[in-house]
Image (spheres, helix red, strand yellow):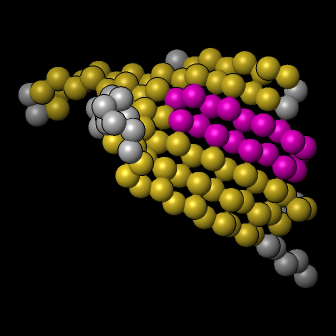
Amino acid sequence: MQSGYKISVPLFVGLELEYTDGTLSRMDLVREVYRMRANVLFSPSVTLNNFIQYDNFTRHMGWQSRFRWILKPGNEISLVWNSISQDPFERFEITENAARLKVQYNYRF
């Protein structure tokens, strides 16, 4: 189930729910994944995409931010930040985080 709303031309907010119900090794499995997205379009070539996700089965919450700048088609720079928190409703402690700088350059001849 997904729902989204474009607040204005450059801002989008969305909510998603992914529900899985099944049986695994004689154990009932109900997994719910909740996501919230917030995307900002500064220009057609500069964007900031964010999402926060919570999984009730693993009890992990993750956050990803991605800043993307397209210099020209085929050439772009991205800065990506990821973090994971265990048991965010018990104690909010970030257990993993990583930042990556990605540069893509195409040379045409």
Front residue of this view, candidates 65 and 70: 65
Residue furthest out toward the bottom: 109
Residue located at (58% from left, 61% from top): 99
**Above or below, comparing residue 65 to residue 108 in the picture:** above
**Above or below, comparing residue 105 to residue 96 in the picture:** below
**Above or below, comparing residue 83 to residue 105 in the picture:** above
**Residue 81 spot, x, y in % from top left:** 59, 54
Residue located at (88% from left, 27% from top): 9
**Would you identify the image quadrant in which residue 101 lies?**
bottom right
**Would you identify the image quadrant in which residue 86 lies?**
top left
For the C terminus, give its image quadrant.
bottom right
* Count of numbered badges drawn on the protein: 0
The magenta stretch spans residue 50: yes
Residue located at (85% from left, 32% from top): 10
Front residue of this view, candidates 68 and 107: 68
Question: Can residue 60 be seen by looking at this rendering?
Answer: no
Q: Write the start and end of the magenta stretch as one range.
A: 35-52
The magenta stretch spans residue 51: yes
**Residue 106 spot, x, y in % from top left:** 81, 73
Question: Can residue 48 be seen by looking at this rendering?
Answer: yes
Left or right, 75 with reference to 96: right
**Above or below, comparing residue 102 to residue 8 in the picture:** below
**Residue 55 spot, x, y in % from top left:** 38, 32
Residue located at (53% from left, 42% from top): 63
**Overall secondary structure of the magenta stretch?**
strand
Front residue of this view, candidates 17 and 62: 62
